[in-house]
Amino acid sequence: MMELNALRQFLVVARLEHLSGAAEELRVAQPSLSRTIARLESELGTPLFDRSGRLRLNDAGKLFRDHVERGLGELDAGRRAVAEAVSDGVGTVRLASETFLTLTGTLAAFKEAHPAIEVELRWASADDMGRLLRAQDVDLCVASQPIHAEGLESVQLLDEAVGVATPLGHPLAGRTSLSIEELAGQPFVSARKGHWQRRLLDRLFAARDLTPKIVCEVDEPSAIAALISAGLGIGLVPAFAMGGATRVPAAWIPVDSSDCRRAVTLYWGAGSHLSAAARLMRTTITNWAWVMPS
């Protein structure tokens, strides 16, 4: 009979495809973890990983992973449903996003309206969001790029232009629009690979057989505008980030390209049980007045 702990350990190994890394994350001895995986494979009657060279999840392993994620997700959802029922429906909502800068106003309004609901925020890349929703590790995700996973429902929140931000006084600061070709050779401040802003930058340049000159990669996308203002370079910044009280001193110039945009979308699992708290959060986010701050 398969143990829940063994299944949870399998999911970590499947995600990392690295035994020693999984053992370190799980804080268990690697030989013990290896025996756990071997027992699962013995019970199933087939290997779950290819072991020629680097450890790789095989087709059987991927099929098993998907079922384990859904099964454990339903179990956790059941636990949360019981906890919600005995706590008069107050509960907790878990929200993941690539950046929370866009959501600060919405979250503040939600907490003001529902102060008893606990809100758990988690940074996640778009590549991980499908897995997190499928496993019900989070209730809702907000992404600025498509999530490629089955079994999700979504609603678009915001579709906005992305422009070029430059330091004040920069030679390009007075322009009313810029082409991608004019940006070739300019020093860019950018998010790391995988983030929507970096993918957009790479895609715009690759479509013109160009490569952006990136002089600064950051793990905190919300810091990009501040670093640009400090004179480190130029960068792609959504219109939303250039307004409101958090605006930094920088120029913002539209890009002469119809696909230089971002679409912010709310996702949730199509077949998952959303708690009352999660449904309230979904309603608040969906009904928010998504307009550019002045």
Image (cartoon, helix red, strand yellow):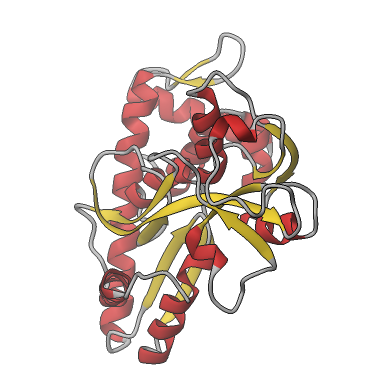
Of all residues shown, which one is farthest toward the top?
A: 52
Q: Quadrant of residue 22?
A: top right
Question: What residue appears at the point 46 percent right and 69 percent down from the top-left corner?
Answer: 103
Q: Of 39 and 144, which appears nearest the observer?
A: 144
User: Is 142 situated above or below 279?
Assistant: above
Residue 108: x %, y % from top left: 46, 83
Viewer can see residue 222: no
Horizontal side, residue 204 vs residue 140: left or right: right
Viewer can see residue 212: yes
Q: Of 61 and 195, which appears nearest the observer?
A: 195
Count of residue discs: 0
Q: Of 241 and 124, which appears nearest the observer?
A: 241
Residue 183: x %, y % from top left: 63, 35
Question: What residue appears at the point 30 percent right and 46 percent down from the top-left corner?
Answer: 70
Horizontal side, residue 55 vs residue 150: left or right: right
Residue 175: x %, y % from top left: 60, 50
